[in-house]
Amino acid sequence: DIVMTQTPLSLSVTPGQAASISCKSSQSLLHSDGKTYLYWYLQKPGQSPQLLIYEVSNRFSGVPDRFSGSGSGTDFTLKISRVEAEDVGVYYCMQATHSPRTFGQGTKVDIK
Amino acid sequence: QVQLQESGPGLVKPSETLSLTCTVSGGSISTYYWSWIRQPPGKGLEWIGYIHYSGSTYYNPYLKSRVTMTIDASKNQFSLKLNSVTAADTAVYYCARGASPGYWGQGILVTVSS
């Protein structure tokens, strides 16, 4: 199985500051169809996960533009340009290039 | 906007079968893939598998021998059965739309205990 490793595992951020989460995969996520199936989810406290970013860098419907994704191959990053209080929760990366789909262990973000 | 709602028993005995249903509203089930994902208490996410409205399925190989997913387009529902459960199957079970889900249900906690 593809192992997804997120760093850091926790992050405390001052509102208005930027934050960055890394996700590294044990194998390249470039699919034979030319796409890279790397996703980012946020699970707010007490809620189900919500999709933020699909296929590395595409924001899902309704996701604020302060969220952005980048990367290629095995190294990916989620950036929040200006963290707001509503951004607290656990962030997960997920790969769907290889079966089975696998998730990172999660990065907990809270506000200072 | 599409909404998903899981339903089923919250308590299942060891060795028995866990059965959950997901009801889809605000859109037809007769398109897209439909997924199940679970999350043990305090832990991360585990993908269980997905089903297409045509009935084709793909299951996580680690669970494949115990999992069955079905779809009932007439009721706009899809279902999960997981047999021979143990305490390790205790988790919040989520249904979701898409093979890489964009919309998720609120989740249902299923506890395996005698």
Image: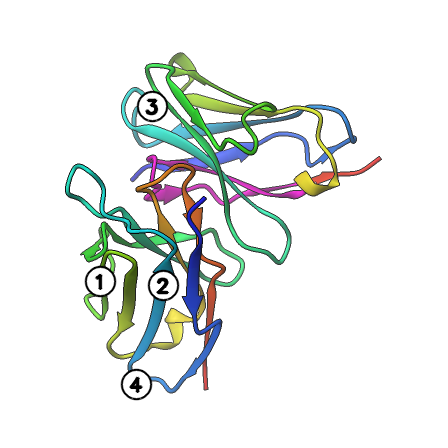
Q: Residue at x 51, y 23 (%)?
A: B79
Between B3 and A63, the residue placed more toward the observer is: A63
Residues at discs 2 and 1 in contact (Cβ within 8 Å): yes
Residues at discs 3 and 4 in contact (Cβ within 8 Å): no
Which type of secondary structure does the marked residue at label 4 adopt?
A: loop
Chain to which mark 3 belongs: B
- Measure the alpha-carbon separation of dots 3 and 4: 41 Å
Q: Residue at x 38, y 30 (%)?
A: B34
Chain to which mark 1 belongs: A
Which type of secondary structure does the marked residue at label 1 adopt?
A: strand
Instruction: Please state which amino acid type lies under the numbered disc 2.
Output: Cys
Question: Sequence-wise, which precedes: disc 1 or disc 4?
Answer: 4
**Residue designated by label 4:** A17
- Measure the alpha-carbon separation of dots 2 and 4: 20 Å
Chain to which mark 4 belongs: A
Q: Residue at x 32, y 44 (%)?
A: B102
**Residue designated by label 2:** A23
The crowd level at tag 2 (other Cα within 10 Å; few <14, some 14-19, many 20+) is many
* Label 3 in the same subunit as label 4: no
**Residue designated by label 1:** A71
Question: Sequence-wise, which precedes: disc 2 or disc 4?
Answer: 4
Instruction: Name the mark nearer the viewer: 3 or 2.
Output: 2
Instruction: Name the mark nearer the viewer: 1 or 4.
Output: 1
User: x, y (%) of residue A66?
Assistant: 22, 71
- The range drawn in magenta is B90-110
Q: Residue at x 44, y 74 (%)?
A: A8
Instruction: Name the mark nearer the viewer: 3 or 4.
Output: 4
Vertical order, B35 against A57 (above or below): above
Vertical order, B82 against A51 (above or below): above
Chain to which mark 2 belongs: A
- Measure the alpha-carbon separation of dots 2 and 1: 9 Å
